[in-house]
Image (cartoon, rainbow, N blue to C red):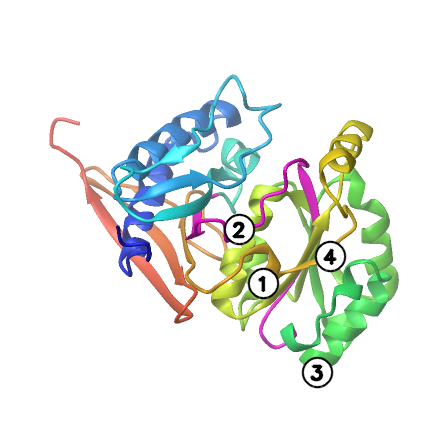
Amino acid sequence: MNTRIADNIGLDLVRATETAALTAGRWMGLGQPYEADAVATTALLSALNEIDIDGCIAVGEDQASRARYSPIENKIGTGSGPRIDIVLDAVDGINQLAKGYPGALSVIAVAPDSCMWAPASGVYMDKIVVNDQVAPYLVPECINAPAAWTLALVARAKHKKISDLTVFLLDRPRHQDLVDEIRAAGARVLLRTDGDISMGIQAAMSKSRIDILMGAGGIPEGLILACAVKAFGGAMLGKLDPQSPEEQEAVEKVVLDPDQVLTVEELVSGDEIFFAATGITGGSLLDRVHYDATHATTNSLMLRGETHTQRRIITQHFFPLDQ
């Protein structure tokens, strides 16, 4: 059996995210985030199961809030192709979708078998994401350092003033102290309630209005983002960041060093990485799904780690006349 991931798998992944985005887009603004996520997840898994891969979900979503709506299967594909790790999110930004806000995406990232960091326990990870200009200067100490120290490092690398930096964080109570630190240092803060993958990708891009992503988010989202960051040539740091006593206890039982700081190379090893995303509600990264009388239009991003290739794909999907 060929153990190498096919060079054209990126297009297969884009077709899958397009399918999920086309399904989810029908739910934009309807105020039903979990129902939308459920139907989009079903569509995404159905599309992936037609691909000749022997895929396994490396790290799944926290099912506490979604169990009744979107069960995640562990095995993906026809089983006849190479063994690969997969991390996916049919709708990254379910609240954005439900409210009609920009930023919701359908995303998939894949790597060879056992190349993705997969903690046995834990839901949240703290992370920092920067682009290739800052990458040579990002050190593991940054993730535990005062925000002002890290922002000074980023500003020097980008030949900017700290006051010219824009920092993205999820708008969560757990980040209030960090937001205060960032503002005290003089940098600007950009907050969103959901969708840190979209903004993290922009932080990893060479030219973007986001200079750095900071703060805690889900582990699956962090791994998806790590794949995109590697493909862009950026840098990322991550470590487990339990948000409850129960999560802390679970992590301490199974993780040898819960305080270990991981680089992007440790989060996802090797370069045989593929990433695909399709916009659902639109935004500064990808346009939204547009529906017309006879067709719909999607906008997607495809990345390949080995070559750092970036493709923007605009697709028209025509409907049967009786649909």
Nearer to the camera, 117 or 216: 117
Instruction: Look at the image and give the residue range highlighted in magenta.
Output: 105-134
The kind of residue tagged 1 is Glu
Q: Which residue is mark 2?
A: 116
**Furthest residue to the left?**
321
The kind of residue tagged 2 is Met
State the CA–CA distance, disc 3 to disc 1: 26 Å
Q: Which residue is mark 4?
A: 261
Image quadrant where one finds the C terminus: top left
Q: Is residue 266 magenta?
A: no
Nearer to the camera, 256 or 207: 256
State the CA–CA distance, disc 2 to disc 3: 33 Å
Q: Position of residue 5 (x, y in %)?
A: 33, 56
- Disc on the earlier residue, 2 or 4: 2
Q: Which residue is mark 3?
A: 159
Residue 195 shows in the view: no
Q: Judge left or right: residue 241 versus residue 231.
A: right
Residue mark closest to the camera, 3 vs 1: 1
Q: Which residue is mark 1?
A: 265
Q: Judge left or right: residue 235 versus residue 154.
A: left
**Furthest residue to the bottom?**
159
The kind of residue tagged 4 is Val
Mark 2 and mark 1 in contact? Answer it, CB < 8 Å: no
